[in-house]
Image (tube, helix red, strand yellow):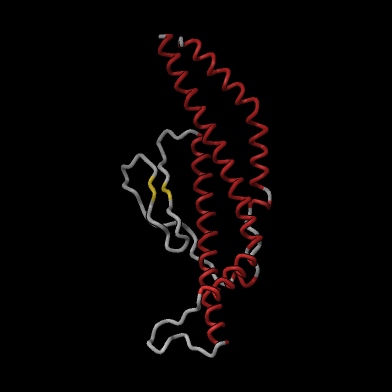
């Protein structure tokens, strides 16, 4: 393909992108500004404990020019991503990076709190069942007393049922955020292609 033809095709793609991106951007902004993108209100019993906010303190090498994935967080069990910030970061690249960072922090906080709630309620359930049976928290050999699989199935079923709405809101927000991230990734990719085409056009003209 001739450089001129490639440039014309690239300009046509960018014109089509500009024509539709404003309405799509407005829709995305509205979706993130609405209350639906926030987590479902937590009831009193679920707000008793809150895990520390923020992601892992892992830091990649200073001279690294790539994204780094850190070790699993001890509260959420999620691996944090440390995003590389290039010196010539474009506005679209910056918007994409910040959206990914904000989504990661939101995801981290949700699962850290959820795991903490799960652990606390599980222990309370076990203690309650053992007390009902007239048993202590330790066996005669000194080991920690536990319940069998059938008894624990009652807890898992109850926990999932009680948190059904919270998980439903989480899944909805997760899909919204992933759609927005995918959109901006496509936008950044098209802009990079367009910039390469412009550079080739300049070289061919010179």
User: In the image shown, does 127 or 170 lie closer to the viewer?
Assistant: 127
Q: Is residue 205 above or below residue 90?
A: above
Q: Residue at x 43, y 16 (%)?
A: 200
Q: What residue occupies the far front of the structure in this picture?
A: 150
Q: Residue at x 62, y 23 (%)?
A: 16
Which percent across, then down, holds residue 122? 53, 74
Q: Is residue 206 above or below residue 10?
A: above
Which percent across, then down, holds residue 98? 51, 44
Count up the numbered dots: 0
User: In the image shown, does 90 or 176 lie closer to the viewer?
Assistant: 176
Which percent across, then down, holds residue 30? 68, 43
Q: Residue at x 31, y 47 (%)?
A: 61
Q: Is residue 26 above or below residue 161?
A: above
Does residue 37 appear left or right of residue 72 in this picture? Answer: right
Q: Is residue 24 above or below residue 4?
A: below
Does residue 101 appear left or right of residue 170 in this picture? Answer: left
Which percent across, then down, holds residue 118? 54, 69
Instruction: Work out which quarter of the rendered image holds the C terminus and state it.
Output: top left
Residue 40, picture quadrant: bottom right
Does residue 70 appear left or right of residue 183 in this picture? Answer: left
Does residue 41 appear left or right of residue 132 in this picture? Answer: right
Q: Residue at x 46, y 9 (%)?
A: 2
């Amino acid at each position: 393909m001739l450089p001129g033809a490639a440039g014309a095709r690239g300009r046509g793609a960018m014109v089509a992108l500009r024509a539709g991106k404003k309405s799509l951007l407005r829709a995305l902004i509205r979706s993130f500004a609405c209350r639906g993108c926030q987590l479902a209100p937590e009831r009193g019993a679920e707000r008793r404990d809150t895990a520390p906010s923020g992601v892992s303190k892992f830091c990649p090498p200073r001279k690294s020019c790539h994204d780094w994935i850190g070790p699993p967080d001890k509260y959420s069990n999620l691996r944090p991503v440390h995003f590389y910030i290039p010196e010539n970061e474009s506005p679209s690249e910056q918007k994409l990076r910040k959206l990914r960072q904000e989504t990661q922090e939101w995801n981290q906080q949700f699962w850290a709190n959820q795991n903490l709630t799960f652990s606390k309620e599980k222990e309370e359930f076990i203690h309650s069942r053992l007390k009902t049976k007239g048993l202590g928290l330790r066996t005669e050999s000194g080991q920690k007393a536990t319940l069998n699989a059938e008894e624990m199935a009652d807890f898992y079923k109850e926990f999932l049922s009680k948190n059904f709405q919270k998980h439903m809101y989480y899944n909805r927000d997760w899909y919204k955020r992933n759609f927005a991230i995918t959109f901006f990734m496509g936008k950044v990719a098209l802009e990079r292609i367009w910039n390469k085409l412009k550079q080739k056009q300049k070289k061919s003209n010179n």
